[in-house]
Image (spheres, rainbow, N blue to C red):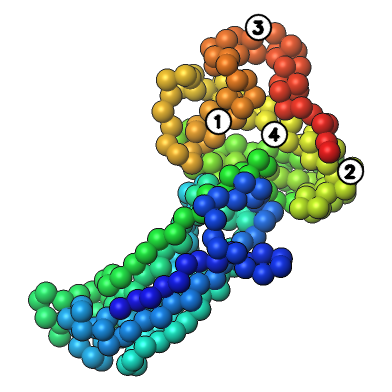
Amino acid sequence: MVNAEPWRLVVEDGEVALPEALPDWDYHMDLRVRRHVRIDVDQARRQSGLPQDAALLISVVWTATGSNLSGPAQHMRLTGAGTVSTEFDVLLRGSDLGGLLLLDTALVLADRRSDARPSSPRRAGSVLWSDRSELRLQGDAPQFPMAIIDFARTSFPDDAAWHLQISDGMEHATMGALLLLVNERNAVTATAFQNAPRPRPIDRIVLSAVYADAARTMIEHALADEDFGEDADFPDGSLGATLLSLFDQLFPGQSITDVRLRQRQSPALFASDLQAAVRIFEVS
């Protein structure tokens, strides 16, 4: 019915088999993937009990668990007979991704069939064949979207360089709850993020400062929430899960209760502890 070759990741010098994970991925990195698919349209109709004039649709849909976003990538309508070959070539924006990337390929009934047999598919979108491929995006860079804007058009101070916006509760998807806003009027910071894929030494210093401040904001937000504790069980890809992972990375072997107490009793010492934990300005 369907012969689908494995997905391939397009890289600078060609293509490679789609890996299980991309350790160096960050939200600046767009992804381009390809796969070749052959469909025996006659066999698909015959095995599904559909008439020979039934229109089919082969499509690819992407989902990113970290951003809680999904969408159609490409599709092809099949109305003829015989074997049809097509290559899906999909470009995905890094700012839309995060967490686990799911690529679902499906052969479906294109239109509703009122003349279908009782045992045959009749609703448009009925799945005749499908498969799923996964790619874990687990880069070390902060996994949340960003935007470069003019702070003069916002309620933020005109001369502030950046602002990490945190909204929604711990159960919400990380990519929907965090947004890093960079002030375009601050040329040094805006340029550092534009150069992030290939940063200069000065860009690395600026990015280190922003990431350190973002980590502080995120940890302080977590500690202010009484539901954030050792026994908390947040869904994968949620803000709570992301903050727990960040806490464990910055304060290994320490309890949330102890760190929360230190933050409240001695905020200046806590700030220094956090500065040391993020290794601010340790740039290569």
Circle nearer the N terminus (3, 2): 2
Circle nearer the N terminus (2, 4): 2
Q: Which residue is mark 1?
A: 245
Q: Is residue 125 above or below residue 152?
A: below
**Kind of residue at badge 3:** Gln
Q: Is residue 82 above or below residue 164?
A: below
Q: Which residue is mark 3?
A: 265
Furthest residue in direction left, as rendered: 118
Determine crowd level at label 2: few under 14, some 14-19, many 20+ residues with C-alpha closer than 10 A. Answer: few
Report helix, strand or loop for mark 1: helix
Q: Residue at x 44, y 77 (%)?
A: 37
Residue 155 locus on image (x, y percent): 72, 41
Instruction: In the rendered structure, find residue 201 and report the number of the disc placed on it.
Output: 2
Q: Residue at x 30, y 70 (%)?
A: 129
**Kind of residue at badge 1:** Ser
Q: Residue at x 31, y 74 (%)?
A: 108
**Kind of residue at badge 2:** Pro
Report helix, strand or loop for mark 3: helix
Circle nearer the N terminus (1, 3): 1
Circle nearer the N terminus (1, 2): 2
Q: CA distance from mark 1 to mark 4?
A: 14 Å
